[in-house]
Amino acid sequence: MKSELLATFRATFLRSPEFIARAPGRIEFIGNHTDYNGGTVLGAAIDRGVWVGLARREDQQRRFSSGQRRDIVATSAGAPQRRSGAESWVNYPLGVIAALGEFGLRAPAGFDYLAVSNLPTGAGLSSSAAIELASALTFVASMGESPPRETLVKVARHAENHFVGVPCGILDQGVSGFGRRDHLVFIDCRGPSFDLVPLPAGAHFWIFNTHTKHALVDGLYAERHRECMEAAAALGVAQLVEVSPAMLAAAEGKLRPSLAKRARHVVEEIARVSACVAALRTENLTDAGRLLVASHRSSQRLFENSTAELDFLVDALVIVPSVYGARLTGGGFGGAVMALTSPEFGDAEARQIAAAYTQAFGTAPDILHAKTGDGAALQ
Ligand code: GLA
């Protein structure tokens, strides 16, 4: 990807970038909608991502281009203004510029900027966090700054929450920032604190992207967020992480049935994340796989953010002997399923799943045998 970035940068801006950064996409391994509830979550950075190149300009123009859309979006150096339509992808780097100020950092007044990606978009692999982190890295480097990685992760999340407008937690940006090859990132979202858990040898990831996206996906994500906050308030805590399973059992009656289901999912999912860390630390992929399936069932029945397509894939995958477990990955309401498999699961098995899916839904899912990769860094 670096050579593609360099070639496209030169063709677009007739010069070379001074700073280059890469940030990976991520897989949500387990911990569905736990992050903004102060809980814990496990994710993996993958070996695909977004590359950003940047060269400073003498004037006050900020010019953005991407590998997908060759046209240039030009803005002035003032406070970033939101873009819409075909230009809306620029809201990610613009959001980062706006967020930097909140952390005492800055972007240059003028620059040429290019982003290229080999991450499938809309696959639930968080291309948005990747572009935010790669942008943040080039902006601060071009100002001679090298803030701690944790600050960059917070900048990226701030951009997503306050400029892009998604009330997400810190999972995507945290994993893209702290990922490491052959490891999972464990995040305790209350700190937040970031740790690495080795991925046992012989564990493989397969992603099945349904390309389905609920028309109201952003609204539904925000609705789940609101329901969780409402449940926490009714239970007398600031965040659902403070609720133990016993507390919930005693107080569940205070909640409307839908809120009780959301709360139960979050409380039990946080416990599953801890159990999964323990399983991984003892290299017990069978137990880890069982927890993944339990997580999916909980998303399906209690959090109600799965779809018929995602359930179909999980049901088809879990009966394959080389599959340890499978679950929806990311926000839900469409998107992708992740399977944790042994090395025996290969293209033939994946094609069989895809064929059954095509028969049921009339379209083929995209399949990605994803490898883990390193977190965001200057190149
Ligand atoms: C999306 C959000 C994350 C997280 C997941 C669900 O990926 O960006 O912050 O909430 O959904 O676990």
Image: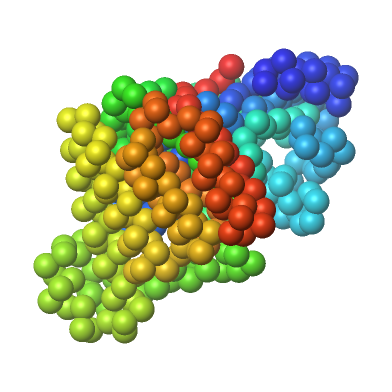
Left or right of 252, for residue 77: right
Nearest to the observer: residue 368 or residue 133: 368
- Assign the N terminus to one quadrant of the image: top right
Across and down, in percent, residue 9 comes to 79, 23
Nearest to the observer: residue 199 or residue 189: 199
Q: Is residue 206 above or below residue 316?
A: above
User: Who's the residue at 21% across and 45% down the image?
Assistant: 274
Q: Is residue 54 above or below residue 78?
A: above
User: Who's the residue at 29% across and 55% down the image?
Assistant: 294
Across and down, in percent, residue 163 comes to 61, 54
Left or right of 204, for residue 161: right
Colour scheme: rainbow
User: Who's the residue at 58% across and 59% down the image?
Assistant: 360
Across and down, in percent, residue 56 comes to 74, 24
Left or right of 76, for residue 308: left
Across and down, in percent, residue 78 comes to 74, 46
Whether residue 212 is visible: no
Whether residue 4 is visible: yes
Nearest to the observer: residue 326 or residue 362: 362
- Assign the C terminus to one quadrant of the image: top right
Nearest to the observer: residue 306 or residue 132: 306
Q: Is residue 264 above or below residue 60?
A: below
Left or right of 284, for residue 83: right
- The quarter of the picture where residue 368 lies is top right
**Number of numbered labels in the structure image:** 0
User: Who's the residue at 62% across and 52% down the image?
Assistant: 358
